[in-house]
Image: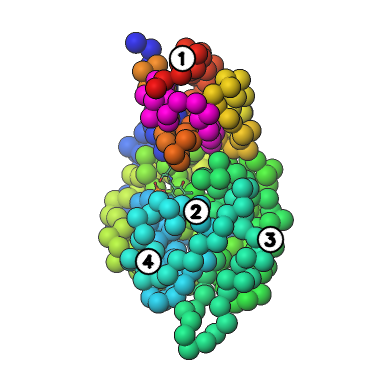
Amino acid sequence: MSAIIDLRSDTVSKPSDAMRRAMAEAEVGDDVFGDDPTVNRLEAMAAERAGKEAAVYVPSGTMANLISVMTHTQPGDEILLGDHCHIFNYEVAGAPRLAGVQTHPLPNLPGGGLDPAAVETAIREPNIHTPRNPLLCLENTHNRCGGAAVPLAEMDALTALAHGRGLAVHLDGARIFNAAAALGVTAARVARDCDTVSFCLSKGLGCPVGSLVCGPKEFIALARRNRKMLGGGMRQAGILAAAGIYALEHNIDRIHEDHENAALLAEGLGRHEVFHVRRPQTNIVVADIVRGTLAGWLQAFRREGVLAVAFGPARMRLVTHLNISRGDIEDALGRIARTAGAVPA
Ligand code: TLP
Protein backbone atom coordinates (compact mmCIF):
# COMPACT_ATOMS: atom_id res chain seq x y z
CA MET A 1 0.00 0.00 0.00
CA SER A 2 1.48 3.34 -0.98
CA ALA A 3 1.67 6.20 1.51
CA ILE A 4 -1.40 8.24 2.33
CA ILE A 5 -1.52 11.65 0.62
CA ASP A 6 -3.31 13.75 3.19
CA LEU A 7 -4.97 16.79 1.62
CA ARG A 8 -7.69 17.27 4.25
CA SER A 9 -6.12 20.46 5.55
CA ASP A 10 -2.79 22.24 5.97
CA THR A 11 -3.35 21.66 9.70
CA VAL A 12 -2.21 18.04 9.20
CA SER A 13 1.35 19.10 8.39
CA LYS A 14 3.89 17.66 10.82
CA PRO A 15 6.88 19.38 12.43
CA SER A 16 10.16 18.68 10.66
CA ASP A 17 13.20 17.23 12.41
CA ALA A 18 14.83 20.67 12.47
CA MET A 19 11.71 22.20 14.02
CA ARG A 20 11.60 19.44 16.63
CA ARG A 21 15.26 20.10 17.45
CA ALA A 22 14.52 23.80 17.93
CA MET A 23 11.67 22.82 20.27
CA ALA A 24 13.83 20.42 22.28
CA GLU A 25 16.52 23.04 22.72
CA ALA A 26 14.20 25.94 23.59
CA GLU A 27 15.01 28.08 26.59
CA VAL A 28 11.85 28.30 28.71
CA GLY A 29 10.32 30.16 31.64
CA ASP A 30 6.76 30.60 32.92
CA ASP A 31 4.84 32.54 30.30
CA VAL A 32 1.99 33.46 32.68
CA PHE A 33 4.66 35.32 34.69
CA GLY A 34 5.81 36.76 31.35
CA ASP A 35 9.31 35.34 31.67
CA ASP A 36 9.47 32.69 28.98
CA PRO A 37 12.17 34.16 26.73
CA THR A 38 11.22 32.03 23.72
CA VAL A 39 7.54 33.04 23.87
CA ASN A 40 8.59 36.67 24.29
CA ARG A 41 10.82 36.41 21.25
CA LEU A 42 8.09 34.79 19.16
CA GLU A 43 5.61 37.49 20.16
CA ALA A 44 8.07 40.23 19.20
CA MET A 45 8.77 38.56 15.84
CA ALA A 46 5.06 38.07 15.17
CA ALA A 47 4.24 41.70 15.96
CA GLU A 48 6.96 42.81 13.58
CA ARG A 49 5.79 40.49 10.79
CA ALA A 50 2.21 41.70 11.23
CA GLY A 51 3.27 45.34 11.41
CA LYS A 52 1.67 45.80 14.85
CA GLU A 53 2.97 47.04 18.20
CA ALA A 54 2.55 43.83 20.16
CA ALA A 55 1.39 40.22 20.00
CA VAL A 56 0.18 37.46 22.29
CA TYR A 57 0.75 33.74 21.71
CA VAL A 58 -2.39 31.59 22.02
CA PRO A 59 -3.07 27.87 21.54
CA SER A 60 -5.31 28.01 18.43
CA GLY A 61 -6.79 30.12 15.68
CA THR A 62 -10.21 29.67 17.23
CA MET A 63 -9.02 31.07 20.55
CA ALA A 64 -7.21 33.89 18.73
CA ASN A 65 -10.43 34.99 17.06
CA LEU A 66 -12.49 34.61 20.24
CA ILE A 67 -10.01 36.63 22.29
CA SER A 68 -9.93 39.29 19.57
CA VAL A 69 -13.72 39.56 19.41
CA MET A 70 -13.96 39.55 23.21
CA THR A 71 -11.33 42.27 23.59
CA HIS A 72 -12.90 44.54 20.94
CA THR A 73 -16.45 44.27 22.30
CA GLN A 74 -18.79 44.29 25.31
CA PRO A 75 -21.46 41.62 25.82
CA GLY A 76 -24.61 42.74 24.01
CA ASP A 77 -22.71 44.32 21.10
CA GLU A 78 -23.15 43.17 17.53
CA ILE A 79 -20.27 42.30 15.23
CA LEU A 80 -20.43 42.39 11.42
CA LEU A 81 -18.81 39.56 9.50
CA GLY A 82 -19.11 37.49 6.32
CA ASP A 83 -21.60 34.65 6.17
CA HIS A 84 -18.87 32.27 4.97
CA CYS A 85 -16.23 33.32 7.48
CA HIS A 86 -14.60 30.92 9.90
CA ILE A 87 -15.76 32.81 13.00
CA PHE A 88 -19.38 32.44 11.92
CA ASN A 89 -19.24 28.87 10.62
CA TYR A 90 -16.57 26.88 12.39
CA GLU A 91 -16.01 28.25 15.87
CA VAL A 92 -18.91 26.56 17.62
CA ALA A 93 -20.70 29.91 18.07
CA GLY A 94 -18.02 30.94 20.56
CA ALA A 95 -18.49 34.65 19.79
CA PRO A 96 -22.15 34.74 20.84
CA ARG A 97 -21.79 32.19 23.59
CA LEU A 98 -18.53 33.24 25.21
CA ALA A 99 -18.06 36.88 24.14
CA GLY A 100 -21.80 37.53 24.42
CA VAL A 101 -22.04 39.32 21.08
CA GLN A 102 -24.65 39.02 18.38
CA THR A 103 -23.18 38.06 14.99
CA HIS A 104 -24.61 39.83 11.94
CA PRO A 105 -23.51 37.88 8.85
CA LEU A 106 -23.34 39.72 5.51
CA PRO A 107 -23.11 37.82 2.21
CA ASN A 108 -19.50 37.12 1.32
CA LEU A 109 -18.59 37.92 -2.28
CA PRO A 110 -17.12 34.92 -4.17
CA GLY A 111 -13.64 36.45 -3.78
CA GLY A 112 -13.90 36.43 0.03
CA GLY A 113 -14.64 40.13 0.47
CA LEU A 114 -17.80 42.00 1.41
CA ASP A 115 -19.85 44.56 -0.49
CA PRO A 116 -19.09 47.93 1.17
CA ALA A 117 -22.70 49.01 0.54
CA ALA A 118 -23.94 45.98 2.51
CA VAL A 119 -21.58 46.84 5.37
CA GLU A 120 -22.69 50.47 5.30
CA THR A 121 -26.35 49.44 5.45
CA ALA A 122 -25.72 47.00 8.30
CA ILE A 123 -24.09 49.54 10.62
CA ARG A 124 -26.85 50.61 13.00
CA GLU A 125 -27.63 54.16 13.93
CA PRO A 126 -27.24 54.66 17.68
CA ASN A 127 -30.68 54.21 19.16
CA ILE A 128 -32.13 52.98 22.44
CA HIS A 129 -33.25 49.79 20.66
CA THR A 130 -30.11 48.81 18.83
CA PRO A 131 -26.92 46.98 19.76
CA ARG A 132 -23.63 48.83 19.30
CA ASN A 133 -21.49 47.90 16.28
CA PRO A 134 -17.90 48.17 17.45
CA LEU A 135 -16.33 45.60 15.13
CA LEU A 136 -16.08 44.36 11.54
CA CYS A 137 -14.33 41.00 11.02
CA LEU A 138 -12.58 40.16 7.75
CA GLU A 139 -10.76 36.98 6.65
CA ASN A 140 -7.76 36.73 4.30
CA THR A 141 -7.12 34.25 2.77
CA HIS A 142 -10.73 33.23 2.84
CA ASN A 143 -11.09 29.55 3.61
CA ARG A 144 -14.68 28.82 2.55
CA CYS A 145 -14.29 31.04 -0.49
CA GLY A 146 -11.70 28.54 -1.74
CA GLY A 147 -8.58 30.10 -0.23
CA ALA A 148 -9.27 33.38 -2.02
CA ALA A 149 -6.74 36.16 -1.47
CA VAL A 150 -8.93 39.20 -0.94
CA PRO A 151 -7.47 42.05 -3.04
CA LEU A 152 -5.86 44.90 -1.14
CA ALA A 153 -8.11 47.51 -2.76
CA GLU A 154 -11.17 45.68 -1.37
CA MET A 155 -9.58 45.40 2.07
CA ASP A 156 -8.66 49.08 2.00
CA ALA A 157 -12.18 50.14 1.03
CA LEU A 158 -13.70 48.07 3.85
CA THR A 159 -11.27 49.22 6.53
CA ALA A 160 -11.71 52.88 5.48
CA LEU A 161 -15.48 52.52 5.61
CA ALA A 162 -15.41 50.79 9.02
CA HIS A 163 -13.05 53.33 10.53
CA GLY A 164 -15.07 56.20 9.10
CA ARG A 165 -18.09 54.85 10.96
CA GLY A 166 -16.20 54.22 14.20
CA LEU A 167 -15.82 50.43 13.88
CA ALA A 168 -12.56 48.62 14.53
CA VAL A 169 -11.49 45.87 12.13
CA HIS A 170 -10.20 42.44 13.10
CA LEU A 171 -8.60 40.33 10.40
CA ASP A 172 -8.72 36.55 10.72
CA GLY A 173 -5.42 36.04 8.96
CA ALA A 174 -5.11 32.36 9.82
CA ARG A 175 -3.39 32.03 6.40
CA ILE A 176 -2.12 35.60 6.04
CA PHE A 177 1.23 34.46 4.65
CA ASN A 178 -0.61 32.64 1.87
CA ALA A 179 -2.52 35.86 1.17
CA ALA A 180 0.71 37.87 1.19
CA ALA A 181 2.40 35.43 -1.21
CA ALA A 182 -0.57 35.47 -3.59
CA LEU A 183 -0.89 39.26 -3.50
CA GLY A 184 2.86 39.81 -3.78
CA VAL A 185 3.11 41.94 -0.62
CA THR A 186 4.14 41.49 3.01
CA ALA A 187 1.78 40.20 5.69
CA ALA A 188 2.11 43.62 7.34
CA ARG A 189 0.71 45.24 4.20
CA VAL A 190 -2.24 42.83 4.12
CA ALA A 191 -3.03 43.68 7.76
CA ARG A 192 -1.98 47.34 7.50
CA ASP A 193 -5.31 49.02 8.11
CA CYS A 194 -6.79 46.31 10.32
CA ASP A 195 -6.66 47.21 13.99
CA THR A 196 -5.89 43.64 14.97
CA VAL A 197 -4.90 40.50 13.11
CA SER A 198 -4.61 36.88 14.14
CA PHE A 199 -2.56 34.31 12.27
CA CYS A 200 -1.87 30.61 12.67
CA LEU A 201 1.44 28.80 12.93
CA SER A 202 -0.19 25.39 12.74
CA LYS A 203 -1.36 25.53 9.10
CA GLY A 204 0.85 26.46 6.17
CA LEU A 205 3.76 27.18 8.51
CA GLY A 206 3.98 23.60 9.75
CA CYS A 207 3.92 24.02 13.55
CA PRO A 208 2.20 21.54 15.85
CA VAL A 209 0.10 24.26 17.56
CA GLY A 210 -0.17 27.97 18.05
CA SER A 211 -1.55 31.26 16.80
CA LEU A 212 -0.80 34.91 17.47
CA VAL A 213 -3.06 37.88 18.07
CA CYS A 214 -1.33 41.11 17.01
CA GLY A 215 -2.40 44.70 17.63
CA PRO A 216 -1.82 47.83 19.69
CA LYS A 217 0.00 47.42 23.02
CA GLU A 218 -2.99 48.24 25.25
CA PHE A 219 -5.23 45.91 23.24
CA ILE A 220 -2.75 43.04 23.62
CA ALA A 221 -2.52 43.66 27.39
CA LEU A 222 -6.31 43.19 27.62
CA ALA A 223 -6.18 40.24 25.21
CA ARG A 224 -3.65 38.62 27.56
CA ARG A 225 -6.15 38.88 30.41
CA ASN A 226 -8.85 37.30 28.23
CA ARG A 227 -6.44 34.53 27.22
CA LYS A 228 -5.91 33.77 30.93
CA MET A 229 -9.66 33.77 31.55
CA LEU A 230 -10.21 31.28 28.73
CA GLY A 231 -7.53 28.97 30.09
CA GLY A 232 -5.07 29.76 27.34
CA GLY A 233 -2.26 30.94 29.63
CA MET A 234 0.46 28.33 29.19
CA ARG A 235 3.55 27.86 31.29
CA GLN A 236 6.78 26.55 29.69
CA ALA A 237 5.24 27.37 26.34
CA GLY A 238 8.64 28.23 24.90
CA ILE A 239 8.88 24.62 23.77
CA LEU A 240 5.94 25.31 21.47
CA ALA A 241 6.91 28.88 20.65
CA ALA A 242 10.30 27.66 19.42
CA ALA A 243 8.46 25.88 16.62
CA GLY A 244 6.82 29.20 15.73
CA ILE A 245 10.14 31.01 15.60
CA TYR A 246 11.54 28.26 13.40
CA ALA A 247 8.51 28.54 11.11
CA LEU A 248 8.70 32.32 10.79
CA GLU A 249 12.37 32.02 9.90
CA HIS A 250 12.20 29.06 7.52
CA ASN A 251 8.71 28.26 6.28
CA ILE A 252 7.34 31.48 4.83
CA ASP A 253 9.44 31.88 1.70
CA ARG A 254 8.43 28.42 0.44
CA ILE A 255 4.65 29.00 0.59
CA HIS A 256 4.45 29.72 -3.14
CA GLU A 257 5.32 26.03 -3.69
CA ASP A 258 2.04 25.07 -2.00
CA HIS A 259 0.21 27.44 -4.34
CA GLU A 260 1.92 25.94 -7.40
CA ASN A 261 1.04 22.44 -6.20
CA ALA A 262 -2.58 23.48 -5.63
CA ALA A 263 -2.74 24.89 -9.17
CA LEU A 264 -1.36 21.61 -10.55
CA LEU A 265 -3.86 19.63 -8.51
CA ALA A 266 -6.77 21.80 -9.65
CA GLU A 267 -5.74 21.53 -13.27
CA GLY A 268 -5.48 17.74 -13.05
CA LEU A 269 -8.79 17.35 -11.22
CA GLY A 270 -10.51 19.64 -13.69
CA ARG A 271 -9.55 17.31 -16.55
CA HIS A 272 -12.14 14.87 -15.22
CA GLU A 273 -15.57 16.03 -16.29
CA VAL A 274 -17.07 14.86 -12.98
CA PHE A 275 -15.28 17.63 -11.08
CA HIS A 276 -15.82 21.32 -11.53
CA VAL A 277 -12.77 23.09 -10.22
CA ARG A 278 -11.95 26.78 -9.98
CA ARG A 279 -8.34 27.82 -10.39
CA PRO A 280 -7.06 28.29 -6.83
CA GLN A 281 -5.34 31.49 -5.80
CA THR A 282 -3.53 29.89 -2.88
CA ASN A 283 -3.26 26.41 -1.30
CA ILE A 284 -6.96 25.49 -1.12
CA VAL A 285 -8.61 23.58 -3.96
CA VAL A 286 -12.37 23.29 -4.05
CA ALA A 287 -13.98 20.74 -6.37
CA ASP A 288 -17.71 20.49 -7.07
CA ILE A 289 -19.01 17.01 -7.80
CA VAL A 290 -21.06 16.86 -10.97
CA ARG A 291 -22.05 13.17 -10.75
CA GLY A 292 -22.26 10.63 -7.95
CA THR A 293 -22.37 11.46 -4.27
CA LEU A 294 -19.80 13.39 -2.32
CA ALA A 295 -19.55 10.59 0.25
CA GLY A 296 -18.99 8.10 -2.56
CA TRP A 297 -16.17 10.16 -4.05
CA LEU A 298 -14.49 10.81 -0.71
CA GLN A 299 -14.58 7.10 -0.01
CA ALA A 300 -13.21 6.24 -3.45
CA PHE A 301 -10.37 8.73 -2.94
CA ARG A 302 -9.70 7.26 0.50
CA ARG A 303 -9.49 3.75 -0.95
CA GLU A 304 -6.70 5.07 -3.18
CA GLY A 305 -5.01 6.72 -0.18
CA VAL A 306 -5.97 10.31 -1.03
CA LEU A 307 -7.66 12.19 1.80
CA ALA A 308 -9.96 15.17 1.19
CA VAL A 309 -12.87 16.65 3.20
CA ALA A 310 -16.49 17.56 2.49
CA PHE A 311 -16.92 21.29 2.02
CA GLY A 312 -20.63 21.54 1.21
CA PRO A 313 -23.26 19.06 0.03
CA ALA A 314 -21.53 18.38 -3.31
CA ARG A 315 -18.18 20.02 -2.77
CA MET A 316 -14.86 18.70 -1.55
CA ARG A 317 -11.78 20.56 -0.37
CA LEU A 318 -8.16 19.56 -0.89
CA VAL A 319 -5.35 21.57 0.69
CA THR A 320 -1.64 21.56 -0.11
CA HIS A 321 1.00 22.12 2.56
CA LEU A 322 4.66 21.71 3.33
CA ASN A 323 4.53 17.92 3.62
CA ILE A 324 3.11 17.65 0.08
CA SER A 325 5.56 17.75 -2.81
CA ARG A 326 4.93 18.19 -6.51
CA GLY A 327 5.60 14.46 -6.82
CA ASP A 328 2.85 13.76 -4.26
CA ILE A 329 0.40 15.80 -6.34
CA GLU A 330 1.34 13.90 -9.49
CA ASP A 331 0.94 10.66 -7.54
CA ALA A 332 -2.45 11.82 -6.13
CA LEU A 333 -3.66 12.72 -9.62
CA GLY A 334 -2.68 9.27 -10.86
CA ARG A 335 -4.64 7.66 -8.02
CA ILE A 336 -7.63 9.96 -8.60
CA ALA A 337 -7.61 9.05 -12.30
CA ARG A 338 -8.16 5.44 -11.24
CA THR A 339 -11.33 6.45 -9.37
CA ALA A 340 -12.61 9.06 -11.80
CA GLY A 341 -13.37 6.57 -14.56
CA ALA A 342 -15.91 4.78 -12.39
CA VAL A 343 -18.51 7.07 -10.81
CA PRO A 344 -19.13 5.77 -7.28
CA ALA A 345 -22.77 5.36 -6.29
N1 TLP B 1 -9.68 25.97 9.83
C1 TLP B 1 -9.70 24.53 9.76
C2 TLP B 1 -11.11 24.01 10.08
O1 TLP B 1 -11.57 24.55 11.26
C3 TLP B 1 -12.11 24.30 9.02
C4 TLP B 1 -9.24 24.08 8.40
O2 TLP B 1 -8.96 22.88 8.27
O3 TLP B 1 -9.15 24.90 7.48
N2 TLP B 1 -9.56 30.88 10.83
C5 TLP B 1 -9.51 30.23 9.66
C6 TLP B 1 -9.68 31.01 8.39
C7 TLP B 1 -9.32 28.84 9.62
O4 TLP B 1 -9.31 28.22 8.45
C8 TLP B 1 -9.15 28.14 10.83
C9 TLP B 1 -8.98 26.63 10.84
C10 TLP B 1 -9.19 28.86 12.03
C11 TLP B 1 -9.40 30.23 12.00
C12 TLP B 1 -9.09 28.18 13.38
O5 TLP B 1 -7.84 27.66 13.64
P1 TLP B 1 -7.66 26.46 14.70
O6 TLP B 1 -7.99 25.21 13.97
O7 TLP B 1 -6.21 26.58 15.08
O8 TLP B 1 -8.55 26.73 15.86
User: How busy is the neighbourhood of tag 3: few (under 14 within 10 Å), some, or many (20 plus)?
Assistant: some
At label 3, the amino acid type is: Asp
Could you tell me how far apart the alpha carbons at marks 4 and 2 are, in whole angstroms?
15 Å
Residue positioned most to the right = 153
Q: Nearer the viewer, residue 297 or 184?
A: 297
**Residue at point 39% right, 64% down?**
95
At label 1, the amino acid type is: Ala
Q: Earlier in the sequence, mark 1 or mark 2?
A: 2
Residue 205 on image: x %, y %: 48, 39
Q: Which element carries disc 2, helix, strand or loop?
A: loop
Could you tell me how far apart the alpha carbons at marks 1 and 4 are, in whole angstroms?
45 Å
**Residue at point 47% right, 85% down?**
129
Q: Which element carries disc 1, helix, strand or loop?
A: loop
Residue positioned most to the bottom = 128
Q: Earlier in the sequence, mark 4 or mark 3?
A: 4
**Residue at point 66% right, 64% down?**
116
Nearest to the eye among marks 1 and 2: give it.
1
Q: Residue 243's image quarter?
A: top left
Q: Is residue 337 located in the magenta-colored stretch of the structure? A: no
- Tell me: residue 169, above or below residue 41: below
Could you tell me how far apart the alpha carbons at marks 1 and 2 are, in whole angstroms?
35 Å
**Residue at point 47% right, 35% down?**
314
Label 1: which residue? 342
Residue 82 on image: x %, y %: 53, 58
Q: Note whether residue 130 is visible.
A: yes
Nearest to the eye among marks 4 and 3: give it.
4
Q: Earlier in the sequence, mark 3 or mark 1?
A: 3
Label 4: which residue? 96
Label 2: which residue? 85
